[in-house]
Image: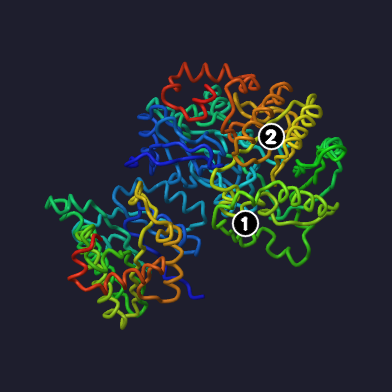
């Protein structure tokens, strides 16, 4: 383990904001313990896919990239154990050909196991399967006490509930045990519906709650009667019998995943309003209703084929806004959010709308029942001001923002988290406040 | 495609390059033996390789500075098909220049030990007859010409490169392939915190991928990023009166 000689500029996936940070790079389990024990205001970092400042240490940043080992897999229980730095991409490459898939996956496979726990990530199946931590059997964590702790629903359940979705603020996660799910094929049976506005989109979500996967791409620049027009993507894991005869020989084969890096920062005009508006309008028109068998990787991770796609937002970086509104206020709140975005003329390629299922057990875990909206914006002063207005709408409607995406919110936004007091109390009681802190936790007073 | 000679013995198995190599060879269906000091600490790496599909994965005690390499191969109980010497130590140039013990350690870890163990490996491969095998040495571009910034490390790597070249020449008749690998800059634990130029810097995974591909093609000397071959050709061709004035 070594300490970086100098602080280096460090940011999240959005490349905004940038801070100076000292790096610590443990290589194995004992070094993780040492890093956690000696940490003062430190935070663990996986592959740096959180958008804002969640994985930038207030003081030191503990990089877990080298803790990337599989530790065990039991095909009788389906329980996979891996070190915190193990990439989801590796799990998929190794396990899918054997007929196992991760129960909940986010929109990129370049996240780590530890990061998926810390953000309690959700996927297109949240309404049906819950969030990632609902499928975690146990976690081993170095909480700085000098002893590696194992926690689960039975063992130290308070630490488990604080760690699941706890943004790394209860210690350095060393290993995670997750229950995998069986699949017959590496393909998804996808059904696509074009819906003309927000009401139609929400109706379609409610009508398809029995479908395993559902998500909508939303045209954030449409306004008036077309406000919230969307393309809804529904999906089920394809069974062997559903594959065309030619594909049945190797049903679990993954297509070669060629990725191309974005070579340069895009100039700012690339995302100027006319370009985005045209793209969104054309994209919407192409989404006629259709059913298709699609490969698993492009279905779940459409942007992963463009490595470093964050560079399309140019040098100043970008921010992602993701909030969730309760079911009963969703229709009114979403209308106001989309209206504010359309009025500001700010929009992104990536507007995503999703119906979420019941809230999970994590004390500051993001998902709750209702609708979640996620959008990217270049980090310009005008857009940051818009985001403050969006925060106001989210707060008025009893919603919450997703900490793994956040780079700029004020502490008042934490009012949306109803169990924050319990989380803070646990951090205080166990001495975590002074040991573990990120730029995000300082900013939001977690 | 011809099968890679198995089992693959990886010496100096705790490095990032070694870990990437082991995963690659397991993915190719090879048996893999990891050798490093304090082999018990390799248990998690063995577990990792098994989950990745390795059916024959083992860890053995190995210290590149330890005497009697012949005894090491005798203890192994089987003759490896491929031996990869990954062990090495960058050290600190200033410290190596100022302190004899530091210099000795760099020389022993990068030349003396690796040379003795690969020679011992060639003896067990020759002893079993015509089957041959493959010896791979992870050397360095630093060995291509002694430079002020790292010549103690570089001189040991130069010796190692010369040894590999000679063994390649000598062992051809025994059907033993000898490959020299010069990774250039690699983003690993050894280079942590250094500002490395991206165009010249490989990942450990790229090194592993290159090694396996080069072994299949029977290559002799491999630069992981081919731009290094050009850079080092230029550096080698500079006349000494000019070279000695440069800050390299």
Residue A1 in view, yes or no: no
Same subunit: marks 2 and 1: yes
Q: CA distance from mark 2 to mark 1?
A: 25 Å
Per the image, label 1 sits on a secondary structure element best described as helix
Per the image, label 2 sits on a secondary structure element best described as loop
Percent of width and height locating residue A434: 42, 22
Of B211 and A176, nearer the camera is B211
Image mark for residue A130: 2
Percent of width and height locating residue B15: 35, 53
Q: Chain of mark 2?
A: A
Residue B135 in view, yes or no: yes
Residue A270 placement, left or right of A330: left
Of A87 and A276, nearer the camera is A276
The answer to which image quadrant residue A180 occupies is top right
Residue that carries the numbered disc 1 in the rendered image: A97
The answer to which image quadrant residue B218 occupies is bottom left
Q: Chain of mark 1?
A: A
Please count the marks in the image: 2
Residue A370 placement, left or right of A391: right
In the image, what residue occupies the spot 51% across and 75% down? Answer: B1
Relative to A177, residue B65 above or below: below
Of B156 and B123, nearer the camera is B156
Compare marks 2 and 1 and give the one earlier in the sequence.
1
The answer to which image quadrant residue A330 occupies is top right
Residue A47 placement, left or right of B241: right
In the image, what residue occupies the spot 34% across and 64% down? Answer: B84
Relative to A247, residue A356 above or below: above
Relative to A348, residue B206 above or below: below
Category of crowding for the residue at label 2, using alpha-carbon neighbours closer than 10 angstroms: few (below 14), some (14–19), many (at least 20): many
In the image, what residue occupies the spot 48% across and 30% down? Answer: A439
Q: Residue furthest bottom?
A: B173
């Amino acid at each position: 383990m070594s300490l970086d000689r100098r602080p280096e500029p460090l940011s999240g996936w959005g490349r905004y904001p940038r801070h100076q940070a000292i790096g610590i790079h443990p290589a194995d389990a004992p070094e993780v313990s040492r890093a956690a024990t000696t940490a003062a205001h430190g935070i663990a970092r996986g592959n740096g896919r959180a958008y804002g400042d969640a994985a930038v240490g207030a003081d030191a940043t503990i990089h877990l990239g080298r803790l990337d080992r599989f530790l065990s897999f039991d095909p009788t229980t389906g329980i996979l154990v891996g070190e915190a730095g193990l990439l989801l991409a590796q799990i998929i490459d190794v396990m899918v050909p054997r007929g196992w898939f991760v129960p909940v996956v986010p929109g990129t496979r370049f996240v780590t196991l530890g990061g998926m726990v810390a953000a309690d990530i959700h996927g297109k199946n949240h309404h049906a399967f819950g969030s990632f931590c609902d499928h975690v059997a146990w976690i081993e964590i170095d909480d700085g006490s000098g002893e590696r702790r194992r926690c689960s629903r039975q063992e130290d359940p308070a630490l488990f509930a604080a760690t699941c979705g706890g943004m790394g603020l209860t210690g350095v996660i060393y290993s995670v045990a997750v229950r995998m799910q069986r699949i017959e094929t590496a393909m998804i049976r996808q059904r696509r519906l074009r819906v003309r506005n927000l009401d139609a989109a929400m109706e379609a979500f409610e009508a398809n709650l029995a479908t395993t996967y559902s998500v909508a791409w939303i045209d954030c620049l449409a306004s008036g009667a077309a406000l919230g027009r969307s393309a809804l993507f529904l999906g089920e894991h394809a069974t062997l019998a559903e594959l065309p005869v030619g594909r049945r020989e190797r049903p679990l084969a993954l297509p070669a995943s060629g990725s191309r890096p974005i070579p340069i920062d895009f100039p700012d005009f690339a995302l100027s309003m006319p370009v985005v508006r045209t793209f969104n309008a054309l994209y919407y028109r192409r989404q006629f209703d259709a059913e298709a068998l699609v490969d698993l990787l492009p279905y779940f991770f459409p942007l992963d084929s463009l490595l470093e796609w964050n560079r399309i937002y140019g040098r100043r970086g970008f921010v992602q806004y993701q909030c969730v509104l309760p079911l009963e206020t969703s229709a009114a709140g979403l209308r106001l959010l989309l209206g504010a975005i359309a009025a500001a003329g700010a929009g992104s390629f990536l507007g995503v709308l999703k119906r979420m299922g019941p809230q999970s057990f994590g004390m500051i875990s993001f998902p709750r029942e209702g609708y979640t909206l996620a959008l990217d914006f270049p980090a310009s002063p005008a857009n940051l001001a818009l985001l403050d207005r969006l925060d106001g709408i989210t707060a008025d409607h009893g919603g919450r923002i997703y900490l793994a995406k956040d780079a700029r919110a004020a502490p008042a936004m934490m009012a949306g988290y109803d169990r924050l007091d319990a989380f803070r109390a646990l951090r205080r009681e166990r001495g975590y406040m002074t040991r573990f802190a990120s730029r995000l936790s300082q900013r939001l007073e977690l | 495609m011809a099968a890679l000679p198995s089992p693959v013995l990886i010496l100096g198995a705790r490095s990032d390059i070694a870990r990437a190599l082991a995963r690659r060879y397991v993915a190719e269906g090879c048996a893999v033996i990891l050798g490093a000091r304090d082999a018990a600490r390799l248990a998690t790496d063995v577990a990792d390789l098994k989950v990745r599909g390795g059916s024959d994965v083992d860890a053995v005690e190995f210290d590149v500075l330890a005497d009697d390499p012949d005894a090491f191969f005798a203890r192994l109980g089987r003759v490896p098909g491929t031996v990869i010497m990954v062990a090495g130590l960058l050290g600190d140039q200033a410290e190596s220049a100022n302190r004899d013990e530091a210099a000795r350690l760099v020389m022993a870890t990068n030349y003396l030990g690796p040379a003795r163990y690969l020679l011992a490996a060639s003896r067990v491969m020759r002893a079993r007859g015509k089957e041959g095998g493959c010896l791979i040495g992870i050397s360095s571009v630093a060995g291509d010409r002694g430079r002020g910034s790292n010549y103690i490390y570089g001189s040991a790597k130069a010796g190692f490169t010369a040894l590999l070249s000679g063994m390649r020449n000598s062992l051809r008749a025994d059907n033993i392939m000898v490959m020299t690998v010069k990774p250039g800059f690699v983003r690993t634990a050894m280079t942590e915190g250094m500002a490395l130029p991206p165009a010249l810097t490989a990942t450990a995974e790229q090194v592993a991928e290159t090694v396996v591909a080069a072994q299949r093609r029977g290559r002799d000397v491999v630069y992981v990023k081919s731009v290094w071959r050009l850079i080092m050709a230029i550096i080698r061709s500079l006349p000494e009166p000019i070279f000695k004035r440069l800050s390299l």
